[in-house]
């Protein structure tokens, strides 16, 4: 009996040590992310980035997105809802972190649609149908094209524009900035330069609301 009690106490002690260790690691991870964002604030925004919302909005969500990322697909309409709820206060700046295989080609396609003023329509169409072209975490750009039909795009021009070396340089810059900011998974969010304390819809909403209240007090 005594041996069994000792074993249980030891197991509980190990479990508590694991929980405390995990909490300390998470706290350190958050502190590191915040420190990187503060130190490298200058690289959060680039002139080449697509912007949704008022250009002079006091609160900016910077999102590092991979169009082949399932979580990005899930979060996109949630962020759109926030923008709709706060049209005078909030804007979205899109940055790229195409970590999935083949996702860089999809980003090039999206950037090419910007030249025809159809970027956000193309983004929504591709995310809505993501499961048809991003298979087993691999983006297959050849399967994505058909979802751009009906958007009023000159698809031949999109194909040509997607090969523009300037797009490759843009994506390379975003990836470099993502690494500098410690973004290792998508979506990666920063609200007025602040990373999420913990990942999730509610933490993002709370941080947005906090920054809006702060902006309105100024």
Image (cartoon, rainbow, N blue to C red):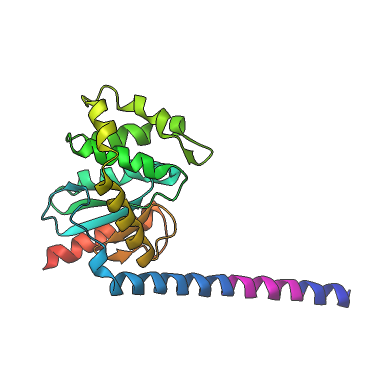
The image shows residue 150, relative to residue 73, as above or below, that is above
Q: Can residue 4 be seen in this view?
A: yes
Q: Residue at x 47, y 45 (%)?
A: 101
Q: Residue at x 18, y 56 (%)?
A: 47
Where's residue 16, x and y in %? 64, 73
Horizontal arrangement in the rendering, residue 156 relative to residue 17 (left or right) = left
Task: Give the position of the C terminus as an image quadrant.
Answer: bottom left
The image shows residue 108, relative to residue 38, as above or below, that is above
Horizontal arrangement in the rendering, residue 176 relative to residue 90 (left or right) = right
Where's residue 175, x and y in %? 36, 57
Where's residue 59, x and y in %? 19, 59
The question of residue 144 being in magenta is answered with no
Magenta span main SS: helix
Task: Give the position of the N terminus as an image quadrant.
Answer: bottom right
Q: Which of 33 and 149 is in front in this view?
A: 149
The image shows residue 104, relative to residue 206, as above or below, that is above
Q: Give the magenta part as a residue range.
A: 9-20
Q: Is residue 205 visible?
A: no
The question of residue 14 being in magenta is answered with yes
Q: Quadrant of residue 70?
A: top left
Q: Residue at x 29, y 32 (%)?
A: 159
Q: In which quarter of the image is residue 141?
A: top left
What is the tally of numbered marks visible in this picture? 0
Where's residue 170, x and y in %? 27, 52
Q: Which of 180 and 59 is in front in this view?
A: 180
């Amino acid at each position: 009996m005594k041996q069994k009690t000792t074993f249980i106490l030891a197991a509980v002690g190990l479990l508590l040590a694991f929980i405390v260790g995990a909490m300390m690691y998470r706290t350190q991870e958050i502190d590191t992310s915040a420190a990187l964002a503060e130190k490298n604030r200058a690289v959060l925004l680039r002139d080449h980035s697509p912007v949704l919302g008022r250009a002079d909005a006091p609160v900016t969500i910077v999102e590092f997105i991979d169009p082949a990322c399932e979580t990005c697909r899930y979060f996109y309409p949630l962020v759109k809802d926030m923008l709709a709820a706060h049209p005078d206060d909030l804007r979205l700046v899109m940055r790229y972190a195409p970590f999935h295989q083949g996702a860089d080609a999809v980003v090039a396609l999206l950037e090419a649609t910007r030249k025809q003023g159809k970027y956000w329509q193309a983004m929504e169409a591709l995310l809505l149908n993501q499961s048809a072209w991003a298979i087993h975490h691999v983006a297959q750009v050849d399967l994505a094209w058909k979802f751009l039909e009906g958007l009023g795009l000159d698809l031949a021009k999109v194909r040509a524009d997607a090969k523009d070396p300037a797009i490759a340089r843009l994506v390379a810059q975003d990836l470099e900035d993502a690494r500098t900011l410690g973004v290792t998974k998508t979506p990666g969010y920063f609200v007025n330069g602040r990373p999420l304390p913990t990942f999730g819809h509610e933490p993002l909403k709370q941080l947005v609301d906090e920054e809006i209240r702060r902006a309105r007090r100024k």
